[in-house]
Amino acid sequence: MSEISTSIAKISVVVNQIIRVELLPNALVDRLALQELLKAYQKLDLQLPVYFLNVFQELNSADFDIKEDFESKERTKMKAAEAFVVKSLSNRIELNYNIQLTKKRYPTKVFLEEQEALNWLKELQAKEAK
C-alpha cells in the first residue's frame, strides 16, 4: 500500500477503492488544503468513484468557507461514499452540522471508531457490486 503525504494528511489505499485520509495533528482544512488533497487523490489513479475513510485527530478544524469547494463537482464525482472518524465531541458536532448543510450526492456518515467506518464502507461497496 503506497502512501502520499500532503501538508495536512497522509493518504493511502486501504483496500480496493477505499482511500484512507488521516489528518495530521492540528491540521486546518482550508481551500488550499482541499486543492492539495484533490491533486493527491488524482495521483492514486483509481477508477472513480471511490470510497473515502477520513480519520480526524483531536485538534483538527476546518475553515467555514470551504463548503463550496468541498461540494464542487470535481470532488463529488470522485466519491461513492464518505465516512468520517471523529473522536472529539466538538469536531463531531461541527462535522454533523456541516453534513446536514451539504448537498447529499453520496452516502456520508460520522463514526467514533475507524473499524466501524471501514465496515460501513465495505458494506456499501458490496451492495454496489450486486
Image (cartoon, rainbow, N blue to C red):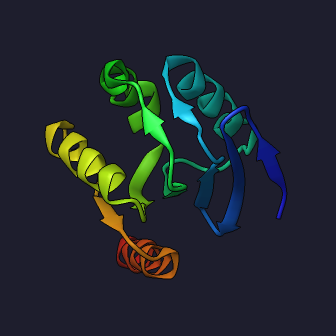
Residue 13 occupies quadrant? bottom right
- Outermost left residue: 100
Looking at the rendered structure, the number of numbered marks drawn on it comes to: 0
Q: Relative to 5, is 114 on the left or the right?
A: left
Residue 101 occupies quadrant? top left
Q: Position of residue 76 (x, y in %)?
A: 39, 37
**Above or below, comparing residue 6 to residue 121 in the picture:** above
Image quarter (top left, top right, bottom left or bottom right) of the N terminus: bottom right
| Front position in the image: 34 or 86 | 86
Q: Position of residue 88 (x, y in %)?
A: 40, 59
Residue 26 occupies quadrant? top right
Image quarter (top left, top right, bottom left or bottom right) of the C terminus: bottom left
Q: Residue at x 65, y 26 (%)?
A: 36
Q: Position of residue 69 (x, y in %)?
A: 39, 22
Q: Residue at x 54, y 27 (%)?
A: 34
Q: Relative to 22, is 74 on the left or the right?
A: left
Q: Position of residue 127 (x, y in %)?
A: 35, 77
| Front position in the image: 93 or 50 | 93
Q: Residue at x 72, y 49 (%)?
A: 10
Q: Residue at x 55, y 55 (%)?
A: 57
- Outermost right residue: 2
Q: Relative to 70, is 15 on the left or the right?
A: right
